């Protein structure tokens, strides 16, 4: 498959990049909650420097059209961005405690049980438990 390259030239190139990405967002090419292409992919597509891509993305972030999630990338706002897995687990356990499924003073399921229930790694489960304990 061959990628079409849209070379951008002229003055204030980052504004042109922001305009093109904004149009793609409004046209639904990148719907809410979707991940935008990486800086490297934008550089290759438009024939620009990485700093130019960053400046264009910063314009969109300033407008509230996208949000940056570390280790995930830039996500189109307005949708339900996928939070980190450990946060999902911690939120689920917190909800169970609040509705009484896990009684006050009762033991939280073991790491092994939580790993199996959520199909998560030991580190992910430990991070979730740390959030519940207020250590993260």
Image (cartoon, rainbow, N blue to C red):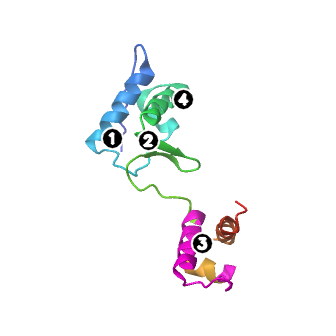
- Residue segment shown in magenta: 86-112
The answer to if 22 sits in the magenta stretch is no
Instruction: Report if the CB atoms under discs 4 and 1 are less than 8 Å apart.
Output: no
Q: Going 66% across and 64% down the picture, which residue do you hit?
A: 131
Give the number of marks. 4
Viewed as shown, does residue 118 lie left or right of 36? right
Number of the front mark, 1 or 2: 2
Counting residues from the start of the chain, the first of labels 3 and 1 encountered is 1
Residue that numbered label 2 is attached to: 66
Is residue 13 or residue 129 the one in the foreground? 129
Instruction: Report if the CB atoms under discs 4 and 2 are less than 8 Å apart.
Output: no
Residue 50 shows which numbered tag?
Answer: 4
Q: CA distance from mark 4 to mark 1?
A: 21 Å
**Mark 4: few, some, or many residues within 10 Å (few <14, many ≥20)?**
some
Instruction: Report if the CB atoms under discs 1 and 2 are less than 8 Å apart.
Output: yes
Query: Of helix, strand and loop, which one carries label 4?
Result: helix
Instruction: Report if the CB atoms under discs 3 and 1 are less than 8 Å apart.
Output: no
Q: Going 31% across and 44% down the picture, which residue do you hit?
A: 29
Residue 51: where, in percent of width, then height?
Answer: 55, 26
Counting residues from the start of the chain, the first of labels 4 and 1 encountered is 1
Residue 25 shows which numbered tag?
Answer: 1
Is residue 29 or residue 93 the one in the foreground? 93
Residue 120 shows which numbered tag?
Answer: 3
Q: CA distance from mark 3 to mark 4?
A: 34 Å
Counting residues from the start of the chain, the first of labels 1 and 2 encountered is 1
Q: Which image quarter is the N terminus in?
A: top left
Number of the front mark, 4 or 2: 2
90 to 79, vertically: above or below: below
């Amino acid at each position: 498959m061959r990628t079409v390259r849209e070379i951008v030239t002229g003055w204030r190139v980052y504004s042109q990049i922001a305009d093109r990405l904004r149009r793609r967002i409004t046209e639904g090419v990148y719907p809410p909650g979707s991940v935008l292409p990486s800086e490297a992919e934008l550089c290759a597509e438009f024939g620009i420097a990485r700093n130019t891509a960053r400046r264009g993305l910063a314009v969109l972030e300033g407008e509230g059209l996208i949000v940056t999630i570390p280790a995930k990338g830039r996500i189109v706002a307005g949708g339900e961005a996928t939070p980190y897995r450990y946060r999902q687990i911690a939120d689920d356990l917190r909800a169970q405690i609040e509705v009484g499924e896990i009684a006050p003073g009762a033991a939280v399921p073991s790491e092994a049980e939580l790993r199996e229930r959520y199909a998560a790694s030991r580190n992910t489960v430990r991070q979730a438990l740390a959030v519940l304990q207020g250590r993260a």
